[in-house]
Structures are given as structure tokens and as C-alpha cells.
Image (spheres, rainbow, N blue to C red):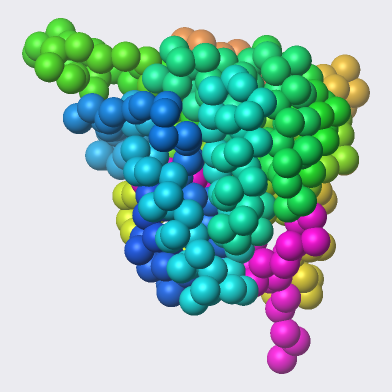
Amino acid sequence: MTMIDITTSFCGIELPNPFILASGPPTSDGRKIIKAFENGWGGAIVKTLKPDHLEVVDVGPRFAVLKSKKGEIIGFQNIELVSTRSLDVWLEEIKEIKKYYPAHVLIGSIMADVKKGSWQDMAYKVQKAGVDAIELNFSCPHGMPEKGVGAAIGQNADLTEEITRWVKEAVDVPVIVKLTPNVTDITEIAKAALKGGADAISAINTVQCLIGIDLDTLEPLPSVDGYSTFGGYSGIAIKPIGLRAVAQIAKTVSVPILATGGVSKWEDAVEYLLVGACVVQVCTQVMLEGYGIIRSFIDGLKRFLMDKDMQSVRELIGLSLGKLKSHSELSLKSKKPYIRKQLCKSCLKCMKISHEVGCGAIKLNELDGLEIDYSHCDGCSLCAHVCPYEAISMSEAVYSL
């Protein structure tokens, strides 16, 4: 049997698989990171470290969720801040982790006030403790921007470039800049980071949000003694935003990309690889299911590569980028829907939607059931998406089965 190679690399750093833990609650202390490595994760980015003089205090509750009609958590808001633990404690734990897991990739995420000395001191100490690379958190959307850091830096191209350059002057390990999606054009910030000397890009951090209002109490969520604040949105719902950002960066600049945002299963990770990422990070889904999900990620990736007759995960990287074009370059030859009669249950939902908000092309024939009047159909595909039985498909062929 052909061996499937799922190893990957960035900036000369080798990983046993492309799956690492993003900076966050699952990497908030050394014990958790070791647990993750024992389960098979290829690497981890520690929960963001800060100088001890930059005080932060977490509130509770600090999480809220958005659920689908079936009860599945599809969106997750947090108002948690960076690590509240002292830098010295972290430095000792980093040494301990690398002592027992020298082959696993450990990345130090750091944040500091906008002073050259603060960033350089943090970076130097974290490098000395033994991390393989340093990630600059320019992207936390809540709490930290009030202090002039986090997304307040990542929304400013000049600051992004300047602080990246400061850190590059202080360390020898690769420097990764983590970008915020809460900007007008993420590629401009990516270019600023590279101008400052960044070796890689991490994208994206959470999307600023207000997840909801409790209609009983009229309090915004998560409610902290009756009040709340705008937070960071993650989970399944933000994957399209993350994919767009990673693809835009990959099409604009040549740089290793460590993708994150809405990865809940191996298929999501493969999509990120296809649009240019070489490493994929996971956080929220680990918070919901635990570290053990890595096994399904690895198994699924291997099966996918075998099905595609590929020997290495590296063959996937950027494979779909060439299929992303400007709107004006897209074909004007429309595909049309066809109804697979053997799957249709005659619920009439497609016909209702077609007549109320579509082209009105779906009609009910008393003898043959539902049929499509192609003289009215413009191929929008809405009927295929609303069908609860997947009985409608899009094809260049114009007929009903």
C-alpha cells in the first residue's frame, strides 16, 4: 500500500501533520498542550502571553453560543482576554513542554503595549524559552483594543509594519503575524506585515460580533451582571470569512499561511489547504469536543488523499486558487436544475419558493409531478438549496429525470 505523507512545513519548520491548536483556551497552560500532543496534534500556539505590567482580568460568563434549529452550535462568541498567568510561569512551562516533546511545534503568541522595548523583551524571552516560532497577536477584537493593542494594531498598517520590524530585530526564530478580519482590506495589512519582515501570516482571528439578546431579560449576551460588550465570533459560521481572507492573501502575496476560522472537521481543513494554507489551526471545535477530534482529522485527510490518488498533503496546497476569478471573468453559460424524481417527495417547497422569490419556473404536473419550465429558469440554483431531500441538482443538461 502506498504510504500517504501528511507532513507539512513552514519557514523550515517540519510538522508531523498540518493540524495545530490555535492560541486560546485549549492552549492556556502547559498541561493542556501536553494533553493535545499526546492525542496527536502536530503543534500548538500558546494562549497569548503579555508583559506582567499589562493587567487583564477575565469576567464570567464570557462565552455565548448561536445554535441552529436542530440545536447544533454553529456560532460561538467569547469576551475572554489574553493569558492572565505571569510570564515567568509561562516561560518555565514552555521549557518543560519542549523538553518532553522536542519534535512537536510550539509557537509563542505574544502581545504587548506599543513600546519597542516591551515587544522586543517579550519576544526575546519567549524565544529563549525554546519556542519554534513567535506569533504576534495584532488581532484580538475585544477588550485589548481598549488598551491600544490587539486589533487596534492589526487595523493600522503602519503599526503592523513597525512592530513586526521591532520583533524581527530581537529574535532569530520565524515571526508570524496574526491578522484580524475586522478590516476593509486584509491584504493591505498582510503586505504591511511582510514589509516589516514577517515570515508567515496567521489568518483569521475572531470576527467582532454581538451574538444575541436574551428576550426574557432584554440583556445582551453573554450577560455579565446585566451588561455585555462586543466580542469575538468563531465556530462553523465564520469559515466562509476565513476562506475568503486566506484566499485573498494567498493570491496577493507569497507567504506561508497558517489558517484558522471555523474548522470543525477534516473537510474544512482541506478547503483551507486548497486555497493556500500550509497549516490549519483549530480552537473552538476543540473547546466543544475535546482534543480527541484530531484522530478523525488525520484519518479523514489520509482517506481523502488516497481517493484523489495523491501521495502528499503538500499536493493540495493552493490547488483551488487558480479557480478563483473576478466576477467579470465568470462564464455566462448557466447550469440548469433538474429534478431527480426518485428522490422527490412532492413537498412542494421548491415550487413555493420559486414562485414567491424566484423565477416561477417550477410547476406541478398532475401526471408527472414537479417539472421545470426552462424558458423561465435562469439557473440561480435557489431551488436546489432549499430542497430538503437533495432531489434537485444543477447541470448543464436541460431536462428532468
Residue beneath the point at 57% across and 16% down: 152
Seen as rendered, the residue at the extreme left is 216
Task: Residue 331: give x, y in percent of width and height.
Answer: 87, 27
**Total numbered labels placed on residues in the image:** 0
Side (left or right) of 6 relative to 208: right
Q: Does any portion of residue 34 appear in the rendered image?
A: yes
Q: Nearer the viewer, residue 336 or 370?
A: 336
Residue beneath the point at 75% across and 15% down: 158
Q: Which residues are magenta?
A: 1-26
Residue 4, quarter of picture: bottom right
Task: Residue 130: give x, y in percent of width and height.
Answer: 60, 61
Q: Quadrant of the N terminus?
A: bottom right
Task: Residue 243: give x, y in percent of width and height.
Answer: 65, 36
Q: Nearer the viewer, residue 310 or 255?
A: 255
Asked if residue 272 is positioned above or below residue 305 in the image, the reply reads above
Seen as rendered, the residue at the extreme bottom is 1
Side (left or right) of 91 relative to 16: left
Residue beneath the point at 36% across and 27% down: 55
